[in-house]
Amino acid sequence: MSIHKVDAKALDMILETMVSTVSESRDEVFDIEEQCRKDFESLTKELEDVKIRVAIMINDSDSLDSKARFARKRLSEVSMHFNQFSEEQVRDAYERAHKLQVDLQMNRQLEKELRNRRDELELRLKGLQQTIEKAAHLVSQISVVQNYLTQDLKFVGEALQEAKRKQDFGLKIIEAQEQERKKLSREIHDGPAQMLANVMMRSDLIERVQRERGPEEALVEIRSLKVMVRNALYEVRRIIYDLRPMALDDLGLVPTLRKYLQTTEDYNTNSGVRLNFVNIGQVIRLPSDMEVALFRLVQEAVQNSLKHAQPQQIQVKLSISKELVTVVIKDDGKGFDAAIQKEGSFGLVGMRERVELLEGSMTIDSQPGAGTMVLIQVPYELK
């Protein structure tokens, strides 16, 4: 099975490029919207001016039309009674009628041009209004996309990296299960199985010794056989305890933790590390799955400390209150930078997985040279 490594930094760079492109597009659309608004304001003012001029032209045309009709009537009277008017009066009547007619035609032509300009401006303003509305809507949509990219997808690289870690953790669990089976098989073969085989051989030897050397020699061999059986029983119990402490089912979490820490301290007498257990809450039984999970969490934290921290003292505090189970594992070891995820390290990942299954929380406080404190809190309602 091929597993491709997730490059969170590359994903973040791609996301930043996307955000930058979307931001530039939003600015461009916004600039277009603003320019359209300026054009809209300018054309609106021009339209108002054109409408005023059209109204003036209409009034002027009406006035000129009335004057032109009167001038034509006057010219008609002069023409009919030509002999009654002087040459200057005839010429004046003709020129006045002609001038008014020309002024009326020019005024009507200008009115027509102004009307056309008004219609053109109204059409352009309608188009600009639609463009402004579309641009504003587009800016709003781009803003939504930008917010989505900058907020909801901000940690997409970390999320994928976390998914990759969980995938690796799942594979590690499978591998650990196989290793645990091999270890268990080897321990049973090299320990109790080998001892029981020796017991069978020694039992045959005892019969021969009893026949050949007498009861006293046989009794010595029986005592040796008892030691061998006792050691085999101890190994069997140790293996069972590693698989699942029987005391956890029989006595509960508090006595099992106390016994586990004492046994672990005895196993590590050469290192001089001291393991202390403090129970500051009620001593009650919890649901079986919760007791197992909390025991394994403490076991993992203690083993991590012994393996990596080189501590002189490890303290485990347990508190069971009305609504909360609190566990604190603290050591005075060399500590580490809790913000750095060590490649290939699945101990803390496994602990977080267990805590999440309990719907609880886990906090790790550690600094190089300042020891480590693991705080685990799990909600629990006493009945």
Image (spheres, rainbow, N blue to C red):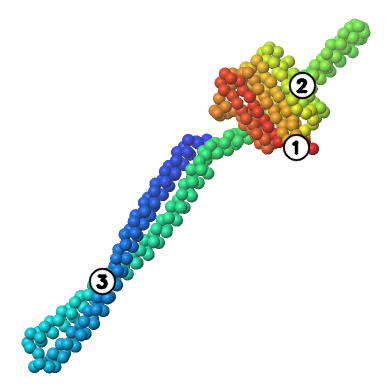
Left or right for 101, reference 349: left
Residue 212 is left or right of residue 306, and the answer is right
Tell me the residue at 24%/79% (across/down): 63
Q: Secondary structure at mark 1?
A: loop
Image x and y of residue 113, in percent: 25, 71
- SS for tag 3? helix
Residue 33 visible, this angle: yes
Q: Which residue occupies the foreground of this view, 221 or 65?
A: 65
The disc labelled 2 sits on which kind of residue?
A: Lys
Q: Which residue is mark 2?
A: 259
Tell me: 191 left or right of 149.
right
Residue 232 placement: quadrant: top right
Q: Is residue 232 left or right of residue 364?
A: right
Q: Quadrant of the N terminus?
A: top right
Residue occupying image coordinates x 23% and y 82%: 66
- Residue 190 in view (yes/no): no
Mark 2 surroundings: few (<14), some (14-19) or many (≥20) residues within 10 A: some
Residue 204 lies, with reference to residue 287, above or below; the image says above
SS at mark 2 in the image: helix
What residue did someone put label 1 on?
381
> Which residue carries the number 3 mark?
113
Quadrant, the C terminus? top right
Nearest to the eye among marks 2 and 1: give it: 1
Q: Amino acid at mark 3?
A: Glu
Callout in the foreground (1, 3): 3
Asked whether disc 2 touches disc 1, contact meaning CB atoms under 8 Å apart, the reply is: no
Mark 2 vs mark 3, foreground winner is 3
Q: Is residue 3 above or below residue 84?
A: above
- Mark 2 or mark 1: name the one nearer the start of the chain: 2
| Label 1 with label 3: CB-CB less than 8 Å | no
